[in-house]
Amino acid sequence: MLNTEIIDGIATVTIDQKDRGLNVISTALSKALDECISGLAVDPAVTGIILTSGKSSFVVGADLAEICEFIALGPQQGRPDLTLPSNQIRRMETCGKPIVAALPGTALGGGLELALGCHHRIAADTPDAVFGLPEVGLGLLPGAGGTQRIPRLIGLEPALKLLTAGKPVSAAEAKKLGFIDAVVPADDLLASARKALVEGRVGAKQPWDEKGLRPKGTPINSFEAFNTFIYANAGVAGTAGPYQPAAAAILSTVYEGIRLPMDRALTVESQYFAHLLDSHAAKGLIESRFFLRNRMSKRGMRKANAEDATQAALAAKMREAISSEAKAIVAEGQGANVVRNAALRIGLPAPIAPEVVTGDMPGDAKMLDQIGKRLLNAAAKSVTAEADQDLTSLVAIDLAGFPEWTGGPALWAKAQN
């Protein structure tokens, strides 16, 4: 998993998980890194450390299978310590030895967070390499310091955009933003990292551990910063909605943590991360965007096909179930406008045409939630007898408008029991 070589006082630690095509953050890797870096930190023969990868990429995120195990355990069932990766990175950046991250390629999620815990970051100039924190797309937030280090490195506005959109950027853009320090030819990567250490260009202390740090850009206590959060909150409320709480949690984590010393800020982050881990959206989005797609890809079908008669019929069945339930709710005396709003709020296509919507009040949140769940339940119930639940879930999400955050009809129905 880790290979360490010490030459002329510089220790090169190479991450290479032999049983995987890509390196991922796991409990085992965090523990191995903690032990390795702690040992190098007290070795008088070591003056600096290079952290790199034996693969074409660096580390591409968390072990999602392990994350799902944590979700399944729940907070009351002996869930492992969720702060292990964050604590490992914090001990690494305060170990007293300068550390350079030499990134041969892509660093995403926990992999980028690991690199952010190094004191200097150099990326290889690889065309297809990307760098970012895409956890929001899986219903989570960066739980190993990303919400706190990125704003301190690149400033508030670009950090909030990077964190809440979750869209990775190229090495050149990462350098422009300020969280990659240099981009070099791939063949020069390790030599450049060694040179930076030998020439004394890398300190052993992070900027946020220096007194008087002022993140670049908008001052965090200014009226402009307050407005930035107001606009950002409005933006995520309009796109993610109440059933995908990750983006709003990211904003809260940054807002509360950015004014605190790093150790306390990381505690805030870990608390929000644990809260999101217990949301249905985290489980649903990981299932629908990762595991379901991968399972279906192995069957030669990563997306549903509207031209397939069986799939089209399945989608039509679910849409009809939603429409019928919507009509039944209206027949019970509920306003058509309320039903339409409930569908949109939960992430379903509007089951009632705009021309038949009345002028009813939009409805309170509790009412909308109850109606929205009735619509979801009706769609899920209409296909529970289908033998191929993976195909049904793919069709539901791609063709019938079943919200991705649910994980599909099967997972949604299971959660209601």
Image (spheres, rainbow, N blue to C red):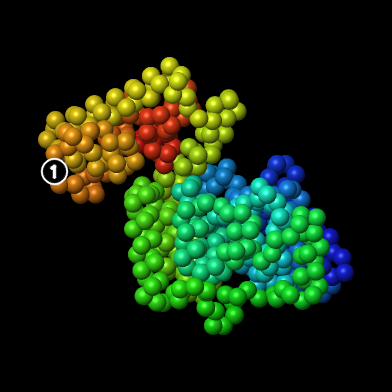
Write down the quadrant of residue 398 in the picture: top left
Q: Is residue 231 visible?
A: yes
Please report the residue visible at 41 percent of the width from the left and 42 percent of the height from the top.
405
Please report the residue visible at 84 percent of the width from the left and 60 percent of the height from the top.
5
Placement of 411 over or under 241, stated as above or below: above
Element assignment for label 1: loop
Q: Position of residue 208 (x, y in %)?
A: 57, 75
Placement of 334 over or under 213, stated as above or below: above
Looking at the image, residue 59 sits to the left or right of residue 383; the answer is right
**Observer-nearest residue: 335 or 130?**
130
Amino acid type for the residue under numbered disc 1: Asp
Please report the residue visible at 49 percent of the width from the left and 58 percent of the height from the top.
163
Figure disc tally: 1
Looking at the image, residue 346 sits to the left or right of residue 144; the answer is left
Instruction: Answer few, some or many: residues within 10 Å of disc 1's Cα (few below 14, many 20 plus, some between 14 and 19).
Output: few
Please report the residue visible at 32 percent of the width from the left and 42 percent of the height from the top.
346
Q: Is residue 393 visible?
A: no
Looking at the image, residue 10 sits to the left or right of residue 27; the answer is right
Placement of 377 over or under 131, stated as above or below: above
Q: List the residue tagged with mark 1.
A: 360
Quadrant containing the C terminus is: top left
**Observer-nearest residue: 274 or 251?**
251
